[in-house]
Image (tube, helix red, strand yellow):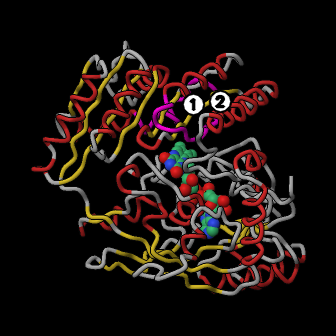
Amino acid sequence: MDALAEDLAALVNRESLLTEPDYLMTYECDSLSFFKQRPRAVVLPRTTEEVSRILAYLSRKGIPFTARGSGTGLSGGATPVEGGVVISLARMDRILEVHPRDRCALVQAGVVNTALSKALEPLGLHFAPDPASQPVCSLGGNVGENAGGPHCFKHGMTLNHTLGLTLVLPGGEVLHLGGPCGEPDLDLAGLVVASEGTLGIVTEIWVRLTPNPETFRTLLASFRSLEDCSRAVSRIVRAGIVPSAMEILDKKSIEIVEASVNKAGYPLEAGAVLLVELDGRPEEMERPLSAVEEACRKEGALEVEFAKDPEHRMKLWKGRKGVYGTAGRLAPDVYVMDGVVPRNRLAEALHRIQEVTDSRGLVCPNIAHAGDGNVHPTICYDGRDPEQAQKAEEAGREILRICLELGGTITGEHGVGLEKLSLMPEMFPPGSLRVMRRVKAVFDPAGLANPGKLIPLEEP
Ligand SMILES: Cc1cc2nc3c(=O)[nH]c(=O)nc-3n(C[C@H](O)[C@H](O)[C@H](O)COP(=O)(O)OP(=O)(O)OC[C@H]3O[C@@H](n4cnc5c(N)ncnc54)[C@H](O)[C@@H]3O)c2cc1C
């Protein structure tokens, strides 16, 4: 054991420390495999006090660190930094308090998203943000990235469901920001949401709980073209309807879902399908549901199909939620991207994305959280072939530039991490980036918390 390992072992018990190369290899990257860096050590603390002791020690030694939840991030946020230590929150997985009447709970950061909702089921409550990775990803990671999901169009992203949190600063100081009643004034807890582990480590979170809807009504509309489908989305929003989810799948996505075990019954002849869900009280469903149907038909829907029962609803959703996994049938590697465009430019964006990938000979199924204009092109490539990997990276960069050109942003919910760092100066003016660097320096003057992620270190 080297000196660092010996010191860390004295701060936490030995079984909470990993230093063997075989174990360290599994922490080299998150779900984006373009970037890899082996950490010097991985520590798995169980309490806020342990995290505080570790950060105080690393600060004295000037060693950088990276917080890691479940490592499902798609932008390299949890990828270690050179010479750094990974602090995994995976063993901090306890639900500490539940207050059904106040609709809030206090959880440790390593609690898995669906584990919380499953535990709350008997109380008729759940945690609303529903990333497709929810059976695996942690609530700390959701806070780190401000995670969203199909149902966030109506219910809001992680930021809207975070009332407070415990943050351990680099150096070891413990801050309690907000609480069960939220943050009364300057919202420092809100500032930490989406900071990608660059301000410190979140160990506990006060989350807002949402009552389970009494009913869901789900429909699938198929269209000849992406244009018709996108116009239907705009028409639904213009009519003042707020579905809980509105998801577009393009032709390629339909084809791969229907060729997989997660067959959803999506019509193969369609150029695009729109999956719309409404939730609420049964007596409030009919009017908005028929307005959605009417909007789809007015924009030329080929067919509108309503989920007949909960099993049919699950089948329609299983197809959508399985797109990334199913894309793995097309190539050994998938690069799941994330950008945002104004809703009325969705069809244009999706066509241009197709051109970018087609011109490089890459297959790219496209799905979108249509209500938010959030596109998720899934570029399929073979990472063993350096030329293909380079093409995939280049295509990704061009796609994000298209999002900016159309008036959108380079991330909707997957964060900046390492993947989009070099595009930050194209999205933000120098003044904004300077302020971000100053904010980081207030929390982390020595620059040890996940440096080189999210905020470019130097002036361009
Ligand atoms: C198949 C698949 C589907 C996905 N679908 C969605 C989706 O629909 N919507 C969506 O938003 N995302 C989605 N993602 C991306 C990812 O799951 C989310 O970003 C998720 O929030 C990451 O959680 P995690 O626990 O895996 O975090 P990690 O990947 O471990 O970390 C993410 C970031 O948060 C930081 N972090 C983690 N824990 C803490 C902590 N305790 N304190 C401070 N910082 C911390 C890390 O340093 C890193 O920067 C998907 C990913 C996959 C693989």
Residue 92 magenta-highlighted: no
Task: Residue at 59%, 25% (x, y): give it.
Answer: 364
Q: How many numbered callouts?
A: 2
Q: Which mark is residue 328?
A: 1
Looking at the picture, how far across and down is residue 348, in whole percent? 53, 25
Q: Quadrant of residue 91?
A: bottom right
Task: Residue at 58%, 41% (x, y): give it.
Answer: 408
Give, as a three-letter code, the residue at label 1.
Gly
Q: Quadrant of ligand 1?
A: bottom right
Looking at the picture, how far across and down is residue 193, in whole percent? 57, 66
Q: Which residues are magenta?
A: 320-346
Query: 34 or 228, which lies in front?
Result: 228
Task: Identify residue for label 2.
Answer: 332
Looking at the picture, how far across and down is residue 222, in whole percent? 32, 22
Side (left or right) of 233 relative to 24? left
Side (left or right) of 219 relative to 388? left
Looking at the picture, how far across and down is residue 120, in whole percent? 31, 67
Give, as a three-letter code, the residue at label 2.
Pro
Q: Are marks 2 and 1 in contact (CB under 8 Å)?
A: yes
Could one spot residue 435 in this view of the protein?
yes
